[in-house]
């Protein structure tokens, strides 16, 4: 088995602030993802990465940057936090395409 | 553009009944259809998945029924238990890595 560790678990930022969320996985999975979960809106894909140094935009990439520093880590940056950014950000990983996606516990972002 | 639609938004059944959760999709290139469940305070986890080579997939009390012509698939939870109470997400994916999730169905199983 493996685990996906997201840090921090809770993040409070100020409007306009640049914020970085971090994710580590020890599954040795090639593909990693960042999803945003809002109440009543399901899971929306922000960015994904097929392999180290690869970066692909999801449907919700505007306002975010991401970086796949190495195979085991994938970070997400909120470039300028907005009041409506309050959500849970879920990092995930999978072996490859159309295989089981494993999720981390999430980072809950609150913008004040 | 909502590519994966889920219904109902909320469903309440009695213990022992069969809960039926529905999903439809628009893109005919989708060929992978998983269902995830999420318990309060937890992360989503894969429950069961199907590929269109078959129209039915069973795993214990959980069954996916798939209708390629109508672009619909459903999750049937037989003999529902209070412990099944959770949010269920259907999803659809193609030969790429982008799995599109529905908005979720909140299932409540009453004892």
Image (cartoon, coloured by chain):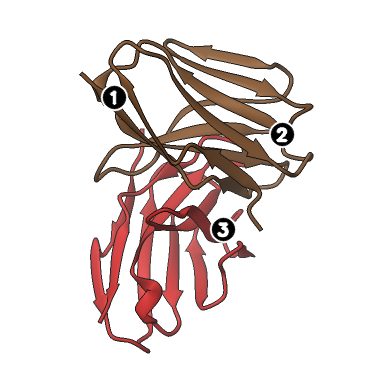
Chain colours: A red, B brown
Which picture quadrant has residue B17?
top left
| Residue A49 in view, yes or no | yes
Per the image, the residue denoted by label 3 is A48
Describe residue B5's horizontal placement relative to residue B54 as left or right.
left
Describe residue A81's horizontal placement relative to residue B58 as left or right.
left
* Foreground disc of the pair 2, 1: 1
Query: Do the numbered discs 2 and 1 sit on residues whose CB atoms are within 8 Å?
Result: no
Distance from Cα at disc 2 to Cα at disc 3: 19 Å
Which is more toward the observer, A2 or A82?
A: A82
Query: Do the numbered discs 2 and 3 sit on residues whose CB atoms are within 8 Å?
Result: no
Per the image, the residue denoted by label 1 is B109
Confirm whether circles 2 and 3 share one chain. Answer: no
Identify which residue is drawn at 49% across, 47% down. B103
Picture disc at residue A77:
none
Which picture quadrant has residue B12?
top left
* Foreground disc of the pair 2, 3: 2
Per the image, the residue denoted by label 2 is B31
The chain under label 3 reads A
In the rendered image, the vertical position of residue A55 relative to residue B2, given as above or below? below
Q: Position of residue B110 (x, y in %)?
A: 24, 23
Which is more toward the observer, A12 or A8?
A: A12
The image quadrant where one finds the C terminus of chain A is bottom left
Confirm whether circles 3 and 1 share one chain. Answer: no
Q: Earlier in the sequence, mark 2 or mark 1?
A: 2
Decide: few, some or many residues near mark 1? Use Cα within 10 Å; few <14, some 14-19, many ≥20.
many
């Amino acid at each position: 088995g493996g685990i996906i560790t997201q840090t921090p678990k809770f993040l409070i930022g100020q409007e306009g602030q640049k914020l970085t969320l971090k994710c580590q996985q020890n599954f040795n999975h090639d593909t990693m993802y960042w999803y945003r979960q809002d109440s009543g809106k399901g899971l929306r894909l922000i960015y994904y990465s097929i392999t180290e140094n690869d970066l692909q935009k999801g449907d919700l990439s505007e306002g975010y940057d991401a970086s796949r520093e190495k195979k085991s880590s994938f970070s997400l940056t909120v470039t300028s936090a907005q009041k409506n950014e309050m959500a849970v950000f879920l990092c995930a990983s999978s072996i490859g395409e159309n295989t089981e996606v494993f999720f981390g516990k999430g980072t809950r972002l609150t913008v004040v | 553009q909502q590519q994966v639609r889920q219904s109902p938004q909320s469903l309440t059944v009695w213990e022992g009944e069969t809960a039926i959760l529905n999903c439809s999709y628009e893109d005919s290139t989708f060929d992978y259809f998983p269902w995830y469940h999420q318990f309060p305070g937890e992360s989503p986890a894969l429950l069961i998945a199907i590929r269109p080579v078959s129209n039915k997939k069973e795993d214990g009390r959980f069954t996916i029924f798939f209708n390629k012509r109508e672009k619909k698939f459903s999750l049937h939870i037989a003999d529902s238990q209070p412990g099944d109470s959770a949010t269920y997400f259907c999803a659809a994916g193609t030969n790429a890595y982008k799995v599109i999730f529905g908005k979720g169905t909140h299932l409540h199983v009453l004892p």
